[in-house]
Image (cartoon, helix red, strand yellow):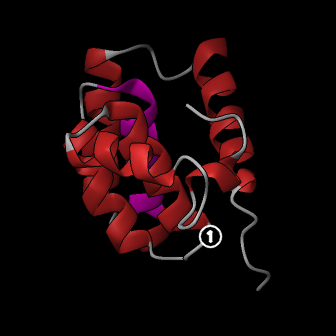
Amino acid sequence: MCRDPNDIFIGGRCRGFFEKCLNVGNIDAVYFESLCLASRHRDLEAAVALLEKNVPNDDESTLAYGVLNMCLGDLVKASEAFQQFIQHHNQFHSERVRKMCNSLEWKLSWYHPAQM
């Protein structure tokens, strides 16, 4: 993936290749596009719909899916996602999961979210 998120925004130097990856369901492309939708465009519903393709196979996507569903107030889907995360990837209370949550927060900030 590109190191600069601006490269995958519309008009960015890597956008064409990124869209090809997205269209074939590349796990990383789906994950990063969903973060962009959630953070930069504030479209949590679209972000969750896109992330659903990666759940439960990808741990980062499953965690983000649960968090974003919590933000939407869908506690049933959030709970299901967290249960799937535990079943497929890790114990929920671990250093690895704490680091994943910190990483999610950091990655969301890459997209320069609009100020409230």
53 horizontally vs 47: left or right? left
18 and 60: which is toward the camera: 18
The x and y percentages for residue 67 are: 48, 51
Q: Which residue is mark 1?
A: 40
Q: Is residue 69 magenta?
A: yes
26 horizontally vs 108: left or right? left
Residue sitting at 72 percent across and 43 percent down?
4
Query: Which segment did they paint magenta?
Result: 58-70
**Picture quadrant where residue 70 is located:** bottom left
95 and 42: which is toward the camera: 42
Residue sitting at 30 percent across and 34 percent down?
26
The x and y percentages for residue 92 are: 48, 23
Quadrant of the snapshot with the N terminus: top right
Give, as a three-letter code, the residue at label 1.
Answer: Arg
Rendered position, 47 above or below 26? below
The x and y percentages for residue 27 are: 33, 32
Magenta stretch: dominant secondary structure: helix
Rendered position, 60 above or below 91? below
